Image (tube, helix red, strand yellow):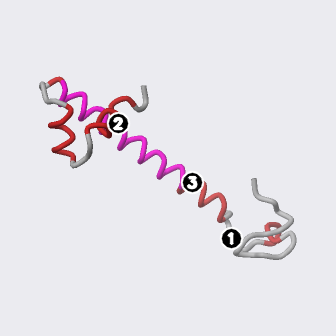
Amino acid sequence: MVDSTVGCYVNPVPYGCLRCPLSVCVYDQELAARRVREGERRAELRERREEIREARERGESLDEIARRRGVSRMTILRWASSGR
């Protein structure tokens, strides 16, 4: 929550939020950007888990998958188990 009594870096004066020239608060913009990044990150994780599942169904070992991705076997195990 933004404290309107202290303003922000755009308008750093007491009660700056009340006299701010911006139509959208910079804190709201930052929060929206963070939510977009988090959504993209979740999508990447889902894609990784799906890729690992498909590779395992094709009979690939964890070591083969790890070698192809350039990560350790433990990383593949962690990726596969995340989000259960």
Q: What's the distance in space between the residues labelled 3 and 1, CA to CA?
A: 16 Å
Q: Residue at x 26, y 38 (%)?
A: 73
Q: On the image, numbered disc 3 is attached to which residue?
A: 32
Q: Disc 2 or 1, which lies upstream in sequence?
A: 1
Magenta-colored stretch includes residue 27: no
Q: Is residue 70 above or below residue 14?
A: above
Locate residue 29, reporting x and y percent.
60, 60
Q: Is residue 84 left or right of residue 7?
A: left
Locate residue 25, reporting x and y percent.
68, 63
Q: Disc 2 or 3, which lies upstream in sequence?
A: 3
Q: Is residue 28 left or right of residue 41?
A: right
Q: Residue at x 70, y 75 (%)?
A: 10
In the rendered structure, find residue 79 and report the number of the disc placed on it: 2
Local packing at callout 3 (Cα closer than 10 Å; few below 14, some 14-19, many 20+) is few
Q: Secondary structure at mark 2?
A: helix
Q: Is residue 44 above or below residue 55?
A: below
Per the picture, the main secondary structure of the magenta-coloured stretch is helix
Q: Looking at this view, is 76 or 35 the one in front?
A: 76
Nearer the observer, disc 2 or disc 1? 2
Which region shows up in magenta? Answer: 34-56
Locate residue 77, reporting x and y percent.
31, 32
Q: On the image, numbered disc 1 is attached to which residue?
A: 22
Q: Residue at x 15, y 37 (%)?
A: 64
Q: Looking at this view, is 57 or 12 the one in front?
A: 57
